[in-house]
Amino acid sequence: MNYLQLTVQAGVATLLLNRPDVRNAFNDEVIAEFTQAFGGLGGRDDVRCVVLAAAGQAFCAGADLNWMRRMADYSHAENLADAAQLAEMLRVIYECPKPTIARIQGDVYAGGMGLVAVCDMAVSVDTANYCLSEVKLGLIPATISPYVIRAMGARAAHRYFLTAERFSALEAQRIGFVHELVSVDQLDARVAEIAQALVNASPAAVKACKQLVQDVAGRDISAELIAGTVQGIADIRSSEQGREGVQSFLQKRKPSWLGG
């Protein structure tokens, strides 16, 4: 990979977006690398969670300017194909069976908001700024919208999609877009704590819980939904890790996934 750097240590995969000279803006090559990387990480037994990080002052400034210059001359069909690649990248990250943490060390703009939104958790430095700037360019944040609206809610999206205002990390936390704010010197320690909590949990249960949230969120509480949750708890209770987890708790020992 040219723009992403992958390290795996003690069950935690860290994927570093390393284009600080362009504020970690992405282009078609970065999109392809993200899609490939998360597709592979999802199937690795030695990976229990994935930290999405970035180098330099900005987390991600959205689309690369040179890529935007090329897109300016695209036909409608070419724009469709290009947008489909971005949509596939976002889907692959969002649906990655491993839990994901966005480690936000700097500003997040436009498409970068999509990268944060597709992660399960987001920890941000308190000095970061956020912006959905598309309407200033005569565009809309269409491809990232399913994930960003889920992350910040429709009410906040109405404001920040339409005004393209820059807003603070504190506001990002208030509207639910990020979970936690820390100082720069606390960022790595806090991300490591969350990652360790994920590593300590049952891998099968974590995977099932992530899918549960995606299946249940926003749905009406119908008989069908209730039946699905009943099936879900029955399945996990009777699974190997479900049985092991309960037995280890009752026997006051570590579960097998922690070397018990």
Image (cartoon, helix red, strand yellow):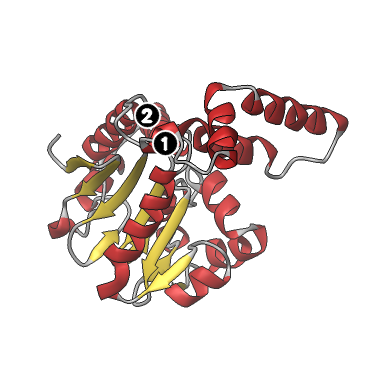
Q: Circle 2 — which element? A: loop
The percent position of residue 63, horizontal first and vertical second, equals 30, 50
Residue at image position (67%, 63%) is 155
The percent position of residue 218, horizontal first and vertical second, equals 71, 45
Q: Give the residue at mark 1.
A: 98
Labelled pair 1, 2 in contact (Cβ < 8 Å): yes
Find the distance from the CA under tag 1 to the CA under tag 2. 6 Å
**Quadrant housing residue 74:** top left
Q: Amino acid at mark 1?
A: Lys
Can residue 163 be spotted in the picture? yes
Which corner quadrant holds the C terminus? top left
Considering depth in this image, is 203 or 97 the residue closer to the camera? Answer: 203
Q: Give the residue at mark 2.
A: 42
Residue at image position (47%, 76%) is 170
Disc 2 crowd, CA 10 A, few/some/many (<14, 14-19, 20+): some
Residue at image position (65%, 35%) is 215
Q: Is residue 111 above or below residue 233?
A: below
The percent position of residue 184, horizontal first and vertical second, equals 27, 74
Considering depth in this image, is 169 or 194 the residue closer to the camera? Answer: 194
Which corner quadrant holds the N terminus? top left
